[in-house]
Image (cartoon, rainbow, N blue to C red):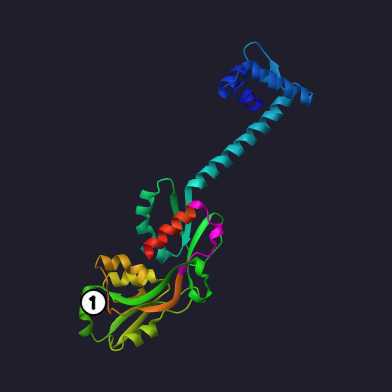
Amino acid sequence: MFEAAARVGSFKGAAEELSITPAGVSHHISNLEQRLGVALFIRQSRKVTLTAEGLRLSEATTGALQKIQTALDDIKLDASRLNIDTTSSFAALVLIPLLHDFCNTHTNITVEVSTGETAVAKVNTLAIRLGDTSLVDQTSLLKNERFNLYGTSSIVRSMQTHASSLVYLTRWKNRQLPDLPWSEWLAENEGVLQNIEIKYFDQELYGIYEAMAGRGLVFCSETLVSDFVKAKALQPVSPQSVGSRLCYYIPTQSGQHSTKMQIFIDWLASNIN
């Protein structure tokens, strides 16, 4: 009541703002002045003016209440916003294409996506990372990754007539991640490729884009090219994919997930599996 009266310069104005009577405002401010032992307002017929003590208190209370309101607004915004942190490849090729359907279904949740190749713990953020299956708790697992070799239909058709095949592989920035199961794929698909030229990128995303442009073949996870295969923009060179030690997982315990996080996790798991 004091803050409102000081801000509008009127007990009546404060009463209208707070939906109480002017007498009620005057009574409470008089009680406050008695507690402090000083006058906070100079009463005039149509307005009130702050004393020096009142001005000092007004500056403190207005600033404090504005800070509280800002905090409440931020909390309300965070309650409706879901921050996702994941790899560039997963964001571009899987998450963002799927988000349209999620946002249409869950109109009360706003999703913001940030990317990076290194896992960094952030408050109120759901991380989705690529990891080593043998080191990931099964309760955190989203999907085990299988790998295959992909190319455009014209590239795949022309493999028999070309002297060599250009294959894009990924060499991870994070050296702790297991290598791609390239050797295992070659063993399972012996004789499919004759002469191989290898080119490395540090993200699967780059190799996939090169393959989409018809510049070669890409060895990558089934998850990342799922939509391209469905659209017939890419096709597997062989029906025989291979498993790997790689997986997508969420590096937090389920007990740490908010309700909106769990809704998103359940939705994502059902879509990518």
Side (left or right) of 6 relative to 227: right
**Extreme-right residue of the structure:** 37
| Residue 261 in sight from this viewpoint | yes
> Residue 113 location in percent, x, y?
44, 56
> Residue 245 location in percent, x, y?
45, 77
Quarter of the image with the C terminus in it: bottom left
Residue 255 in the image: above or below residue 38: below
Residue 110 in the image: above or below residue 21: below
Residue 175 in the image: above or below residue 163: above
Q: Nearer the viewer, residue 235 or 116?
A: 235
Residue type, numbered disc 1: Ile
Residue occupying image coordinates x 38% and y 84%:
184
Q: Is residue 144 magenta?
A: no
Q: Nearer the viewer, residue 172 or 254?
A: 254
The answer to which image quadrant residue 244 occupies is bottom left
**Extreme-top residue of the structure:** 45
- Disc 1 is placed on an element classified as helix
The answer to which image quadrant residue 19 occupies is top right
The answer to which image quadrant residue 66 occupies is top right
Quarter of the image with the N terminus in it: top right
Side (left or right) of 125 relative to 228: right
Residue occupying image coordinates x 40% and y 49%:
106
Q: Is residue 255 magenta?
A: yes
Q: Which residues are magenta?
A: 248-259
Q: How many marks?
A: 1
> Residue 250 location in percent, x, y?
50, 64
Residue occupying image coordinates x 48% and y 56%:
262
> Residue 40 location in percent, x, y?
72, 22
Read off the residue under disc 1. 155
Q: Dot 1: few (<14), some (14–19), or many (≥20) neighbours within 10 Å? A: many
